[in-house]
Each structure stands twice: as structure tokens, then as C-alpha cells.
Amino acid sequence: MVWEVLLICLGGVAVVAGCLVPNRYLPRAMPNDKFLHFAAFAVLAALALRIAHGRVEAALWLLGLLLAGWAIECLQALVPDRKFCWRDIGANAAGIAFAAACTGLYAGLA
């Protein structure tokens, strides 16, 4: 569990840092922005679900991730060359839902 906590903290810092960098400092050849949001939040959600004890705690972790994604989008409005984007929040939510579904399927098979 210690590794999961360390990984989710480092991953969270990386996501926040990556999302709050002005576009002019990002590489020109970047993968699809929505895919990056989806993948990052899917990984964070999978780690959070490994840390959670029980359904209520898992739901709180997932809600917290969704709110963190919203907060990042709000902060992007303050960053040069960046703006708030509902589609990014949708990609974040899809990644969270994907991880939750995969974790639920895995738990059902185990």
C-alpha cells in the first residue's frame, strides 16, 4: 500500500504540473490531449481503488479525482495559452469510469 500512495502522489503532481504548463512550453508533437486526460485519470483511479478500503472510501476517492480534474481545469483559465475545457473533464471522467469498471470486473473474476 505504501507504493500505491507514493505512486498516486507522484502521479497527481505530474498531472497537475503537466496541465498547468503554458502550451508554448509543451512539445509540438504531443499525443491526443483527450487521450492523455483519459489515461492519466484512469491510472490515478486504478491506484486510488487499490488504496481504498470499501465501497464508500472508493467512491470518495473517485469523486475526489473528478473534483481535482475540475479544479485543474479552473486553474488552467489562469495560465497563459490555456483555457477551461469541459471535454477534458469528460475525458477525465471517462478514464475514472473505465478504471472503476475494470477494477469491478477484476474483483468479480477473482
Image (cartoon, rainbow, N blue to C red):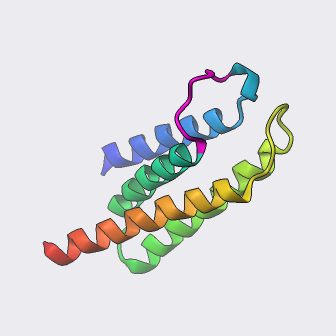
63 above or below 41? Answer: below
Which is more toward the observer, 70 or 82? 82
Q: Is residue 37 left or right of residue 87?
A: left
Which is more toward the observer, 63 or 80? 80
Locate the C terminus by quadrant. Answer: bottom left
Q: Residue at x 20, y 78 (%)?
A: 108
Q: Residue at x 46, y 68 (%)?
A: 97
Which is more toward the observer, 69 or 38? 38
Which is more toward the observer, 4 or 35? 35
> Residue 89, how many percent across, how many down?
65, 59
Q: Residue at x 56, y 64 (%)?
A: 93
> Residue 20, how many percent across, how many down?
71, 35
| Region rendered in magenta | 26-33
> Residue 24, how many percent across, how many down?
75, 22
43 above or below 60? Answer: above
| Residue 101 in which image quadrant | bottom left
Can residue 65 be seen by looking at this rendering? no
| Residue 54 in which image quadrant | bottom left
Q: Specify the principal SS of the magenta part.
A: loop
Can residue 26 be seen by looking at this rendering? yes
Is residue 10 found inside the magenta-colored segment of the image? no
Total number of numbered discs in the rendering: 0
Q: Residue at x 45, y 79 (%)?
A: 56
Is residue 30 found inside the magenta-colored segment of the image? yes
> Residue 60, how many percent across, how many down?
52, 71
